[in-house]
Image (spheres, helix red, strand yellow):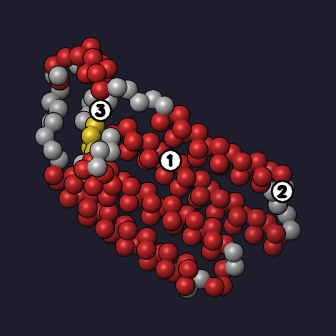
Amino acid sequence: MYDIDFSIAYWLSTYYHFVGVISLVMDMFSIYLIVFQSDKIDDFRYFLLNFQVACAFTDFHLTGLTQPVPLYPLLAGYVMGVGARFGVTTHFAMTGISFFFSYQIGAMIICFVRKHQSIAGTLKRYLIPKFLLFFMLLYFVTFVLSVPGILSTLNIPESQKLEFVKLVRPQAL
C-alpha cells in the first residue's frame, strides 16, 4: 500500500548542513549590518535586529540542533541533529520549532507595524492608537507563549505511540 522508508536519511542531513551553514552566515552578516552599519535608520534597527536574531535562532534550531525527518504518510518522524545525541525528542523539536516560528512571525509583524507607524507619523494620518498597539503587543506575547505551551502538553508516552501505530497502520509496525 504505502512504501515508507525507515532508513536514516543521510542525504537530508547533508541538505540541512548545507542550508544551515548558508543561512547562519547570511544571518550573522545581516546582524553585523544592522548593529554596525545602520546608524541612519533610528530605532527601527532594533526591531530589525529582533527579527534577524529570531531568524538565526530558528535556522540554528531547525538545521543544526534538531534536523527533523518526517515519515510520510505516518504522522511521525525523528530527529537526527546534534540534539539527538543529547536525547532531544521529536516532540521537543516540534515544540521548539513552533516557538521559534511563532516568535519569528510575530517579530516580522512588529517590524511592519513599526514601519507603518513611522510612515503614518510622517503623513499625520492613519496612526494606530497607543492602546491598540498595547493590545497588539499583548497578543504577540500571548500567542508566542501559548502555541508552544499548548503543544508541549500534547506529549504521548512511547508505549501509547506503538499502540497507535498498531491500531492505525499495523503493516508499518
Q: Quadrant of the C terminus?
A: top left
Residue under label 2: 130
Q: Position of 140 compared to 147: left or right?
A: right
- Residue plotted at (26% across, 64% down): 18
Image coords of residue 30 (percent x, y): 48, 75
Tell me the amino acid under the disc marked 1.
Phe
Tell me the amino acid under the disc marked 3.
Ala
Q: Is residue 68 visible?
A: no
Image coords of residue 153 (percent x, y): 48, 31
Q: Quadrant of the N terminus?
A: top left
Q: Residues within 10 Å of mark 3 (few under 14, many from 20)?
A: few
Query: Any mark on residue 132, and which?
Result: none
Query: For the residue labelled by badge 2, is the local secondary structure a helix, a strand or a loop?
Result: helix
Q: Position of 17 compared to 124: left or right?
A: left
Residue under label 1: 99
Count of numbered circles in the view: 3
Residue farthest to the top, as pictured: 167
First in sequence: mark 3 or mark 2?
Answer: 3
Task: Pick whichever, 4 or 156, lies toward us.
Answer: 156
- Residue plotted at (69% across, 45% down): 139
Residue under label 3: 76
Image coords of residue 65 (percent x, y): 33, 55
Image coords of residue 2 (percent x, y): 17, 26
Task: Pick whichever, 130 or 157, lies toward us.
Answer: 157
Q: Residues within 10 Å of mark 2 (few under 14, many from 20)?
A: few
Q: CA distance from mark 3 to mark 2?
A: 44 Å
Residue farthest to the front, as pictured: 86
Vertical comparison of 98 with 150: above or below: below
